[in-house]
Image: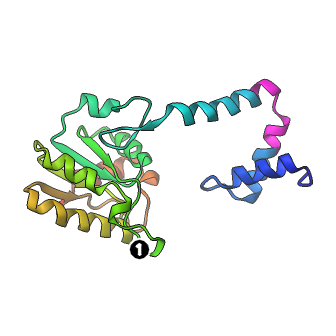
Amino acid sequence: MEYISSIAQLQNAFAKLPGVGRKTAQRYAYAVVTMPQEQAEAFAQALLDVKKQVKFCSVCGNITDKDVCELCQKRKHNIICVVKEPKDVTAIEKTQCYNGVYHVLHGTINPMQGVGPNDIRIKELLARVAEGGVDEVIMATNPDVEGDATAMYIAKLLKPLGVKVTRIAQGVSMGSELEYADEVTLHRALEDRKQL
């Protein structure tokens, strides 16, 4: 069926999603072809709705459908947990052991891919801390080369501001991604964080 251009286009669109290979994209495309018209329209509408309604919080950078996310509205701002992506907020929230706010960088420093400090939300974090009232910043970037480099870089920038900077500790193995860690492991990593 790949000779039908609309199926090939749909397959290519699915293949651009993270973790979706060629075979899975093909299965997804065939599933759309065989689903009832109403279900396909609802699927397409859900995609359009999420693109129209979901945005980034003006304070922390997490995903929300408001200007300021619910976490930033309801929690005290004296502890900020810095993460790479919005999905990392979800992973930490599942632990139910953290009650501060977040700061989503939307990436990590990675010179090999041309991502420098000005390409992620470091300036916004520094501005939040400079406003005062922040006692601690927890660096919860992934425990890989880029995550560690980003955490150390930010820690150096925060030290002159007189804020305690900690790093999540044991439990999260080097090279892993936070979204795949279970709640107990993340809970232990947050509880055992170390000052940088």
Q: Is residue 32 left or right of residue 46?
A: right
Q: Secondary structure at mark 1?
A: helix
Magenta segment, principal secondary structure?
helix
Q: Position of residue 98 (x, y in %)?
A: 26, 41
Residue 165 picture quarter? bottom left
Question: In percent of the image, x 75 and y 45: which residue is there?
Answer: 28
Q: Of the residues shown, which amino acid type is indicated by label 1?
A: Pro
- Circle 1 packing at 10 Å, graded few (<14), some (14-19), many (20+), is few
Image quarter (top left, top right, bottom left or bottom right) of the C terminus? bottom left
Q: Is residue 47 left or right of residue 77?
A: right
Check residue 124 for magenta coloring: no
Question: In percent of the image, x 25 and y 67: which residue is there?
Answer: 153
Residue 185 in view of the camera:
yes
Q: Position of residue 77 (x, y in %)?
A: 19, 38
Question: In percent of the image, x 77 and y 47: which residue is there?
Answer: 10
Magenta segment boundaries in residue numbering: 30-39
On the image, numbered disc 1 is attached to which residue? 111
